[in-house]
Amino acid sequence: MRRRDFITLASSALIAWPLAARAQQAAIPVIGFLSSASPDVYAYVVSAFRQGLSETGYVEGRNVAIEFRWADGQNGRLPALATDLVRRQVSVIAAPGSTPAALAAKATTATIPIVFEVGIDPVAAGLVSSLARPGGNVTGVTNINIELAPKRLELLRDLVPTANVIALLVNPTSPDITKTVSRDLRAGARTLGLQLHILDASTDGDFDTVFATLIQLGAGALMIAPDLFFITRNEALAKLTIRHAMPAITQYREFATAGGLMSYGGSITDAARRVGVYTGRVLKGEKPADLPVQRSTKVELIINLKTAKTLGLTVSPTLLRRADEVIE
């Protein structure tokens, strides 16, 4: 081989190598992770999601990349965030633990696969055609949270038997969740002979008004609806309930661990892990239309005994035995 030909061949190889490396890097699938929450609050959910991915052979940074988009509790930001992921041409969109995020993703794309995790009926919400055969580009996991709202009301009544007036805090920017929970709790309150008042909050500034209204109503206890706007503010809500001596319950264990009285709901980590598994299966080529909607049925009851004592409440031994975790 002549020296000139050798130099030309070597130069071509040097140029082709980074191009090939970039092409190989570009071939790594990208997951779009869309959430109403914030990264600090949802770190444990992301960890569970990654665990599910790993069960199908995908490890972030090795053979898959994840683009995170966080709405920080502001559901109005979700459509733009979903549009950004579609523009990014991600391989699949995962929306664990957020009905508004799942709906925003579905409204944005009919081609990119979507894997959700919601607490409401995904058929009634228009996410899928049926649980067994979702159809289209969407499938996912449901948890056992929305239908537990009447049970949360019973638990709160058992712990605060003198409370005849109960308030329900909802986020009006999550109409599907608000409608379902409000309907179920109105029925539950009538059965128990309780007065139920529904209060709205969708910004931090609404909380002072909510607690002032609770005092005016003479409410003896508060239920917080399952919504990621509230989960991103668990610590603030827990402090407010203690400051105003207001017994409260929600679905999220983070509320109880932050100082709130009690939580009762489906395991978010179990559901997020399942979303990770389904996301990995979609990346391997399975179609969402052929993946039945799964159901996560693991339920946890967390009681903050320290807060109960602060509020002057006595927790029965029976209720303590039922608890999966007692914070002392």
Image (cartoon, grey):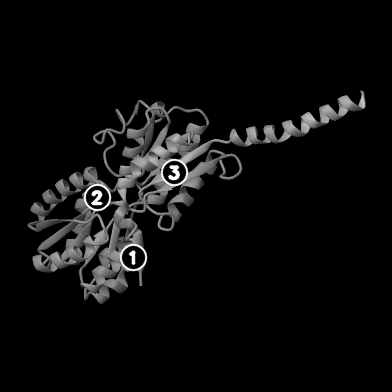
Question: Where does the image place residue 249, in percent across and percent down from the top left?
Answer: 25, 61
Q: Which residue is mark 3?
A: 33
Name the quarter where the N terminus is drawn: top right
Count of picture labels: 3
For residue 162, above or below residue 16: below
Q: Residues within 10 Å of mark 2 (few under 14, many from 20)?
A: some
Which mark is first along the chain, 1 or 2? 2
In three-dimensional space, the C-alpha distance between marks 1 and 3, rounded to whole angstroms, equals 24 Å
Horizontally, residue 227 falls left or right of residue 95, namely: left
Viewer-side residue, 241 vs 301: 241
Callout 2 secondary element: helix
Residue 193 placement: quadrant? bottom left
Instruction: Choose the circle earlier in sequence order: 2 or 3.
Output: 3
Question: In screen coordinates, is 172 left or right of 113?
Answer: left
62 relative to 113 in the view: left or right: right
Q: Are marks 1 and 3 in contact (CB under 8 Å)?
A: no
**Where does label 1 land, which residue?**
235
Q: Amino acid at mark 3?
A: Phe
